[in-house]
Amino acid sequence: MVLPCLRLDEWAAFTLEKLNRSKGSNFLADCLVELRDQNASKDFILLLEELLPYAQSVESYKRSSEFIFLKLVSELQMEARFSLDSILSLIAALSGDLKYDFAPFLPRLVKSLLILLNNGGLKNAETIEQIFTSWSKIIENLRFCFARDVRGALRSTLELRYYPSDIINEKMSKSMSCVLDLARPSQLQKGIKMILSEVAEQPERAARAGFLHYDMIVRLQKS
């Protein structure tokens, strides 16, 4: 079918209408449809233009997951703060579709979040809340993967777990705690040893490791 010449916003609306008719096919498509009416900024519409061709099916964007991920994290900037919530929602949606395949992206996501926090995000309570709403969804999507590899979960999130901020430390500890719900005793033991090793390397980490370390010990005693 040949389409008439459409403005960018018209083309996005046309393509999203097609997605809307088959809503439920994947989380990314659902999220794009939902965000269509919530964010009309020019930059976000341009982003939709780039992502829409990949949202037709999970298979299509699994093949291009690297490009999609890099495109999304490149938008995590305070200059685009009015679109941050939408971008973070799309990243969470991507993790929901990719599941285990999203795990290799996590260290790079952590680095992008650190840059965002360091460049003004830490001073903005709304931004912090948006980050951890998305982060909690991502950890929930990966919890089966991380329950089988607690050390991998700790390794991927190390810099964010020890971020020098009490509120970030508290939110990280709580979100990582849900990973432990499904972990076997052997995985909890490995996690405890890894945290002790992290603190031994840098003793100043002790205060920020306390909650998660204690949580692991309690769970291990109850198992």
Image (cartoon, rainbow, N blue to C red):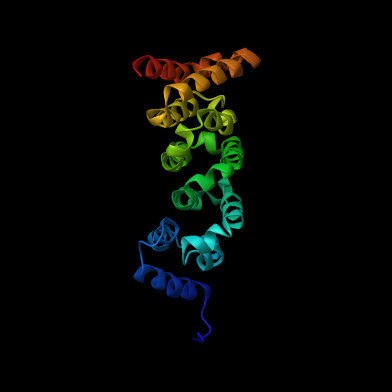
Front position in the image: 167 or 138: 138
Q: Where is residue 44 in the image (x, y as percent from the top left)?
A: 51, 60
Q: Tell whether 210 sits left or right of 164.
A: left
Q: Number of callouts in the render?
A: 0
Instruction: List the single residue furthest toward the right.
Output: 201
Residue drawn at x 58%, y 40% is: 116
Which image quarter is the C terminus in? top left
| Residue 152, position as x, y percentages in the image | 55, 32
Q: Residue at left 43%, top 21%?
A: 185
Residue 189 in picture, x, y percent from top left = 49, 19
Which is more toward the observer, 116 or 219?
219
| Residue 139 visible at all | no
> Residue 147 appears at what percent x and percent y?
45, 32
Q: Residue at x 43, y 37 (%)?
A: 143
**The quarter of the displayed image where residue 118 is located:** top right
Quadrant in the picture for residue 158: top right
Residue 15 visible: yes
Q: Which residue occupies the foreground of this view, 99 or 172?
A: 99
Q: Reply above or below: 33 against 121.
A: below
Vertical position of residue 90 compared to residue 105: above or below: below
Query: Horizontal placement of 62 versus 180: left or right?
Result: right
69 w.r.t. 13: above or below: above
Q: In this view, does 112 lie above or below 178?
A: below
